[in-house]
Amino acid sequence: MVSRREFMQVAPLGALSLAGLGLPWAPALAAVRGPEDIPVDLIVSFLGDNVPSKPEAVPARLIAAMKGRDDVADVYFADGATGALEKQFAQMVGKEDAAFIPSGTMANQIAIRLHCASRPRVLLQDVSHVYRDESDAIAIMNAIHAVPVEGGASAGLADAMAAAFTQSAEDPFPVEVGAVSIESPVRRLDGATVSAATIGKIAALARAKGARMHLDGARLLLMCGMPGFDVRDYCAPFDSVYVSLYKYLDAPFGAILAGDKAFVAKARQARHIFGGNLYHGWTAAIVASKTLTGFEQRFGRVRAAADDLLTRLAGKPGIEVQRVENGSNVAFLKLDERIATGLRERLLQSDIAIRTVREGRLRLAFNETLLRKSPATIAGAF
């Protein structure tokens, strides 16, 4: 399981400059080749979900995304590139409408606020972002009580949710559950995903109890290419779906919250109440839209390449492959000392960036940069 500190250390290349910090040891480190020294169009990065980029490349990316378009500008997210992205996402996840939201936390909070209405309780995984990483916003901003449920991303989550519903209904003081929030893939479980079968069981229970379903699908599209996965089918049991725009879709910020037309209309009103109605969102929307086009097919190729690479690595002495059960885009390597020693530096010479090997274990996160070299070439670099 990745810690929050380790997770936050994975930043786009060029986001930090050692020389600019004025630290006495910065010049010495600057002489050592690091990921930031690899041309961004050549790097194969196992550091995180995103394709690394540098700030100075942003203008060129915007110009490329705007090419051939004369309908870019939006006003308070209406029309332009932002409105087009909303329609693009609504169609992809199979919902009637979608709203651009400045942040994922705001998207989650708006959804839960609207779903619960007069029912003051939401059930959610105890490892979820909403429960662990949103500063008790459910209680502070919405006066809703969050009930953490064990089970993570396993099949046992359905039974745990059923038990939580039963406990909430106990006499003499029953409390109505307004919503169930499910995160999948689960960041704190290294991208493990909740199966469609488990979601179906939970959704049937929620419907029977009069509760609504919300998907925290910040990393939803990283499931593309998983056996049997279809975006629309996976989202169908949910009344609302949130997807992040910046984790792997290149946008500098933003999120999409989708649902039926009545829900999204209320979400846009709540966005304004929460102070989220920025004057423009097109700079994020137009880049996300360009990356989103064809993403399902491209990430299917990423998954196939990752499987090929892991199979090749598993056949090498001193390397043990540890896959995440029902995982999206993360795997681990258990390395003997001979392989681990100097591995990061050796791979950098082949334009491959990895995290630091810790206690003989290396975390690999797969993204679209994996398609820049063949699995055979990458495996050989190890």
Image (cartoon, rainbow, N blue to C red):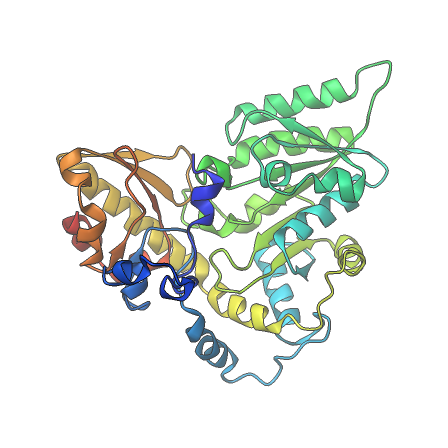
**Residue depicted at 23% across the width and 60% down the height:** 33
**Residue depicted at 17% across the width and 55% down the height:** 377
Query: Which residue is most to the top?
Result: 172
Above or below, 140 against 123 in this view is: below
Residue 1 percent location from the top left of the image: 43, 34
Q: Nearer the viewer, residue 2 or 227?
A: 2
Q: Is residue 334 left or right of residue 91?
A: left
Residue 214 percent location from the top left of the image: 67, 42
**Residue depicted at 65% across the width and 79% down the height:** 73
Q: Nearer the viewer, residue 108 or 57?
A: 57
Q: Is residue 317 visible?
A: yes
Q: Is residue 329 left or right of residue 201?
A: left
Q: Nearer the viewer, residue 361 or 258?
A: 361
Q: Is residue 209 left or right of residue 39?
A: right
Residue 199 percent location from the top left of the image: 58, 34
Above or below, 1 against 276 in this view is: above
Q: Is residue 228 visible?
A: no
